[in-house]
Image (cartoon, rainbow, N blue to C red):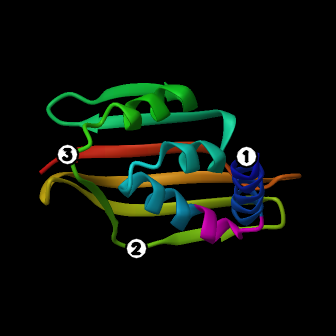
Amino acid sequence: MKKAISIAVLLFFSSWQIHAQTADEVVDSFFEALNSKDHQTLGALCLDDMQLHTLSLSDEIVLNSQSKQGFIEGVKSIPEETEIFEKIISKESIVTEHLAQYTLPYSFYVNDKRSHTGINVISLLKTKQGWKISYIADTRKKS
């Protein structure tokens, strides 16, 4: 019983910490969670109906779409022994009282080898629960 209460208190304070963040902190937390493959935190930072659109840039431009659930399942499917790291090169933002948008050029690494580069555009909305990611668009160009 004590263990269940401790877990409930821990979850409450973890949830409160996520909700008390600024838009900038939510974006930073998103990439920390992505790099550590923490699908629970990723899910908590995004709206339930968050969408992700990716343009793969090669000889042919290919558009892929994912729901939040598809994105989370993709992160969960990364083998434990595979290390990923998305290095953000710079951050530009427009933040208003209830809307925020970030443009983030990046390099993505798998097991310390650069896989691809691109640009992320992330939109956030300030909800009753705090800042939440509502949309992600990114480009991906093989290295």
* Vertical side of 39 occupied by 61: above or below: above
Callout in the foreground (2, 1): 1
Q: Is residue 30 magenta?
A: no
- What is the C-alpha distance between the residues marked 2 and 1? 42 Å
Q: Quadrant of the N terminus?
A: top right
Q: Which residue is mark 3?
A: 81
Q: Find the magenta span and give its range.
A: 20-26
Q: Residues within 10 Å of mark 1 (few under 14, many from 20)?
A: few
Report x, y in % for residue 111.
14, 54
Q: Amino acid at mark 3?
A: Glu
Is residue 128 or residue 125 the one in the foreground? 128
Q: Out of 17 and 28, give the one closest to the viewer.
A: 17
Are there few (<14), some (14-19), or many (20+) residues within 10 Å of tag 2?
few
Q: Which residue is mark 2?
A: 90
In terms of sequence position, does the residue under pointer 2 or pointer 3 come before the other?
3
In terms of depth relative to the viewer, which is nearer, 107 or 17? 17
Residue at figure coordinates x 41%, y 45% from the top left: 138
> How far apart are the two marked residues, 1 and 3, measured between alpha carbons?
31 Å
The vertical placement of 30 against 23, above or below, is above
Indicate the position of residue 11 as horizontal and vertical percent values: 71, 53
- Secondary structure at numbered mark 2: loop
| Dot 3 crowding, Cα within 10 Å, few <14, some 14–19, many 20+ | few
Q: Nearer the viewer, mark 2 or mark 3?
A: 3
Residue identified by numbered label 1: 4
Percent across and percent down for residue 40 are 56, 44
Q: Which of the two residues, 36 or 87, is positioned nearer the viewer here?
A: 36
